[in-house]
Amino acid sequence: MSDSSIDPRIDVLVVGGGIAGLWTLHVLLAHGFDAHLVEAEGLGAGQSVKSQGIVHGGGKYALRSVGDVDAMRAIRDMPERWRLHHGGSRSDPDLRAARLLSDGCWLWLPKGSWFARLQALGLVPLLRHGGLLACPPEPQPRDAWPVVLQTHAQRALRMAEPVLDTRSVLEALREPVSDRLLQVDGAEGIGGFQRLDGSWRSTLRAPDGTCLSLETAALVFTAGRGNAALLTGAERDPDLMQERPLLMTVLRGRLPALHGHCISGGRTRITVTSVPDGDEVVWQVGGEVSERNAEVVPGPATQRAALDEIQACLPGIDLSGARIGHYRAVRAEARNVRVRRPSGAHVEALERGLIVAWPTKWALAPLLAEDVLAQLQSDGIRAHGPSAMHGSGRWPRPEVAPFPWEDCAWTDVSSVARV
C-alpha cells in the first residue's frame, strides 16, 4: 500500500455522494467553503439513483385519509425551486443539463372506484383553499389526460410536480465539481475518525491502496443508510437512523409514458414513473405495493402480485410483450418514534463540526443543503475559499451509479404464472 504522505487541511468533508451530499457540496462551494466529497461506491448508488425522480410538492399527501400537513408544508415549494435550477435561473447548482421526463404528475382513480372519487372531490378543494399546496391537484378534461389514462382511468387530476431522470441530475451535479470528488475503496475506505483540537482527522484509502490523512474543520455525513456505519466510526449512536425497505417493480417494453399515482380509498396504491431506454420504456412502480412486498423474497409470486395491482389500477391494460423484474431499495431516514416517515429533511449537529443529515425525500435536497450551511455557520466554521487539495489530483473520481434495473433478472410478463 502506498501513502500520499500529505496532510492537507480543508473546511468541510462531505461523506456520501447521493443527491443530498452533491447538492450540499455545491451550496458550500458557492458560499466560499473549501469542501470536498467522499463516495464509497458510485454517486447515488445507495438511494438516489433508485428514486423515481418526482419532485413532490405535497399533492399526493392531500388525498391520504388523514392529510400529512407537516409533510405538505415542508415540501410545498420544492417543484418551483427545482424548476428554477433546471431552467438556469438559479445556478447553485445549475441543472440545465438534467433530463426532464415530465413537467407534471397525475393522480388517477381506477375505473369503478366511486368511493375514492367522492373522497378526492371532498378533500382536494379543502386543502387547496387552505393554502397548503403550491401544486394542487387540478381537474383536466379527458382529452388532456395521457392516452393510457383516457382508456383505463375513471378520473384524473394533474399536479405541476416535475419528474427528472435521476442519473442525469446526478451527472449535472457531478460535472462542475468533479475535481472535488474522491472515490474511496468501499465502506472501509474512510474511517479513523479522530477528534483533534477544533478539527477532525480522517483516513481515506483509494481503490489502488493509496492513503490520505485529511484534517477538516467539519464532517457532514450524507451517506443515507451508510450513515449508521459512519456514526459508529465517529463513536456516535447509529440508532439515530431508521430504515424502511422497498421492493420496487420494473416493467420494460413498448410501454406508454406515464408519471403519477393511482389513488383509491385515500391510499397510494401504485406510483409509476417512466424512463425511455432505447426504443423501450421502463416503468418504475412504487407505492403501497412496494412496501407490502418489501420483506418478501422476489419471484413469481411477487411478480404476479405486482401485476395484479398494476392491472387493478389500470383495468384492461395490455402488457403483452413487456418484461417484469424487481429491485430492492431502502429508505434511510432519521429515526421517528412511531417509525413513520419524517415530515421534512433532517439535519442534526452531534457536536461542533459533526453533522449528520437525511433528506427524507429526493425533492428536499435543497432544504437539507441550506440547513447544513446554516448549522456550519452557527458552529462558527469559517469559509476559507475553495482551493485545490494538494496531492489529490491523481486521486480517482467517482462516476454516477447505473440505474438499478440494469442488473435486473427479467421475466416475460406472459410467462408469469398466477400463484
Image (spheres, grey):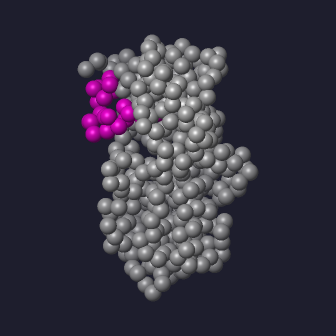
Where residue 136 appears, as percent x and y from the top left, is: 60, 35
Residue 296 painted magenta: yes
Q: Give the answer, above or below, for where 49 lies relative to 116.
A: below
Q: How many marks?
A: 0
Where residue 259 appears, as percent x and y from the top left, is: 55, 30
Please give the range of residues in magenta: 283-305
- Within the image, what quadrant is residue 174 found in? bottom right
Pick the residue in front: 369 or 39.
369
Where residue 343 appears, as percent x and y from the top left, is: 46, 50
Residue 348 in view, yes or no = yes
Q: Decide if residue 89 is on the left or right side of residue 332.
A: right
- Single out the residue that lies furthest toward the bottom: 197
Q: Residue at x 56, y 23 (%)?
A: 156
Residue 263 painted magenta: no
Q: Residue at x 53, y 76 (%)?
A: 379
Residue 279 in view, yes or no = no
Q: Residue at x 40, y 53 (%)?
A: 333
Q: Give the answer, above or below, for where 181 lies relative to 388.
A: above
- Single out the residue that lies furthest toward the right: 89
Pick the residue in front: 123 or 355.
123
Quadrant that contains the N terminus: bottom left
- Within the image, what quadrant is residue 408 found in? top left
Quadrant that contains the C terminus: top left
Q: Decide if residue 52 is on the left or right side of residue 28.
A: left
Q: Give the answer, above or below, for where 246 lies relative to 34.
A: above
